[in-house]
Amino acid sequence: MLKSKAAVLALALGVVAPVVALAQSSPARDALKHACTGDYMELCSAYAPGGPEVEACFRSNMKNLSPDCATAITAYKKEQRATKRVSEAR
C-alpha cells in the first residue's frame, strides 16, 4: 500500500503544468506540488500528468480548487514572472 501511495504522489507531483516538471526546485514549486496534489486527484486525474490536458483542467477548474492550491498557483506564477524578468534582463 505504501508503494501505491508513493506512486500516486509521484504521479501527481508534476501535473499542474508541464513547465513545473521541468523547472528546478523552488519554494513556490514545492508548495504547488504539496497544495495541489489532492486537487489533481479529485478534479484532473483522468489526464496524464504533465500534459497540456492537465493544465487546461486546472485552468477550467480554478473556481473549484482548494484555497491552498489556488494560492500556490498564484505564487508559482508570480515567481515564474519574476524569474523570467531576471533572465531577460541578463
Image (spheres, grey):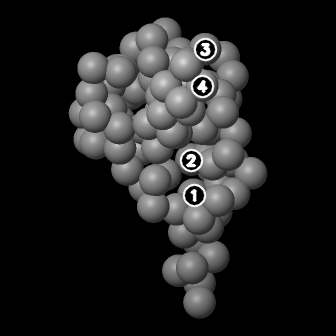
Residue to which mark 1 is pinned? 80
Left or right: residue 55 versus residue 30 is: left
Q: Nearer the viewer, residue 68 or 25?
A: 25
Inter-mark Cα distance, 3 to 1: 21 Å
Q: Nearer the viewer, residue 21 or 56?
A: 21
Residue to which mark 4 is pinned? 2
Residue to which mark 3 is pinned? 66
Kindly report which numbered mark, 1 or 4, lies closer to the viewer in this rendering.
4
Task: Count neighbours of disc 1 (C-alpha within 10 A) and say few if under 14, some if 14 to 19, many if 20 or more.
Answer: some
Inter-mark Cα distance, 2 to 1: 5 Å
For numbered disc 4, what is the local secondary structure?
helix
Residue 48: x and y, percent?
28, 34
Q: Nearer the viewer, residue 25 or 59?
A: 25
Question: How many numbered callouts?
Answer: 4
Residue 38 found in image quarter: top right
- Residue type pointed to by label 1: Gln
Residue 43: x and y, percent?
40, 14
Task: Count neighbours of disc 3 (C-alpha within 10 A) and say few if under 14, some if 14 to 19, many if 20 or more.
Answer: some
Q: Which of the marked residues, 1 or 4, is nearer the chain's N terminus?
A: 4
Q: Is residue 55 above or below residue 59?
A: below
Q: Which of the marked residues, 3 or 2, is nearer the chain's N terminus?
A: 3
